Amino acid sequence: GAGVSQSPSNKVTEKGKDVELRCDPISGHTALYWYRQSLGQGLEFLIYFQGNSAPDKSGLPSDRFSAERTGGSVSTLTIQRTQQEDSAVYLCASSSQRGGAEQYFGPGTRLTVT
Amino acid sequence: KQEVTQIPAALSVPEGENLVLNCSFTDSAIYNLQWFRQDPGKGLTSLLLIQSSQREQTSGRLNASLDKSSGRSTLYIAASQPGDSATYLCAVYQAGTALIFGKGTTLSVSS
């Protein structure tokens, strides 16, 4: 079956512009996670969604970052007024249930802010 | 606050060698531990998932062990091949959080 997909695969934007990153989780997976991988920083958690519960936004680095998940499936991560330090690979993962289930990752979106 | 450490940061071995990658974590209250592989410019591929009640998991030439009380996990790769060259990431899952990752071990296997 299809895995987690993300689009675009690469995005170059000018400082100050807004960007939207998309994630399509594995069908039927109720949990969806966003992570960021910065050079030298490793992978850090941003936000996660579980079913219809309120999302855990504790990892978002600033209020310029937001995410939504429509219909319990597709998710969009929005970064407003992008800064150069936002340049990173943004990874999405999904799992079949909350807690303890294996997470499956998408290929990521490489964001470059010039 | 949970911290995950992977040692070594980089490793170079000749083809055919058996090797061990190490992962340690500071808080033993974990639900599970997951090992991933990441190829350059690619996403993460899950290799093995060990639940907190388990001691080890095996898949092909890979064997992962977990000692929760001491906060350690190892990934054993038997008979390494050039195609095993990648970055290997260890991550732990705790209640109410997402995965917490180590910074990875970059493995290079030469033919």
Image (tube, helix red, strand yellow):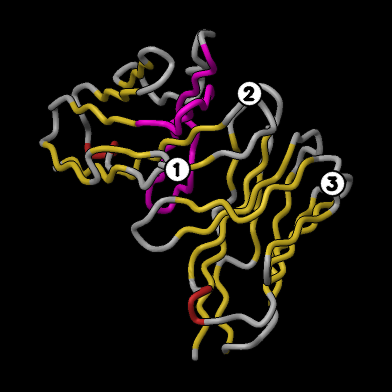
Q: Which residue is at the front of the view, B10 or A29?
A: A29
- Label located before the other in sequence (1 or 2): 1
Residue of label 3: B54
Amino acid type assigned to the residue bearing label 2 in the image: Arg
Q: Marks 3 and 1, Cα distance to the nearest angstrom?
A: 28 Å
Viewport quadrant of the N terminus of chain B: top right
Chain of the residue on which disc 1 is drawn:
A
Whether residue A8 is situated above or below residue B98 in the rendered picture? below
Q: The magenta stretch spans which residues?
A: A24-51
- Helix, strand or loop at label 3? It is loop
3 and 1 marks on the same chain: no
Residue of label 1: A1
- Helix, strand or loop at label 2? It is loop
Q: Could you classify mark 3 by the number of other residues whose Cα lies within 10 Å: few (under 14), some (14-19), or many (20 or more)?
A: few
Chain of the residue on which disc 3 is drawn:
B
Q: Marks 2 and 3, Cα distance to the nearest angstrom?
A: 19 Å
Whether residue B100 is situated above or below residue A64 in the rendered picture? below
Amino acid type assigned to the residue bearing label 3 in the image: Gln
Q: Give the number of the disc on residue A98.
A: 2
Residue at (56% x, 64% y) in the render? B105
Q: Position of residue A86 (x, y in %)?
A: 29, 36
Relative side of A74 to A31, left or right: left
- Which callout, 3 or 1, points to the residue nearer the camera? 1
The answer to which image quadrant residue A15 occupies is: top left
The answer to which image quadrant residue A85 occupies is: top left
Residue at (34% x, 58% y) in the render? B41
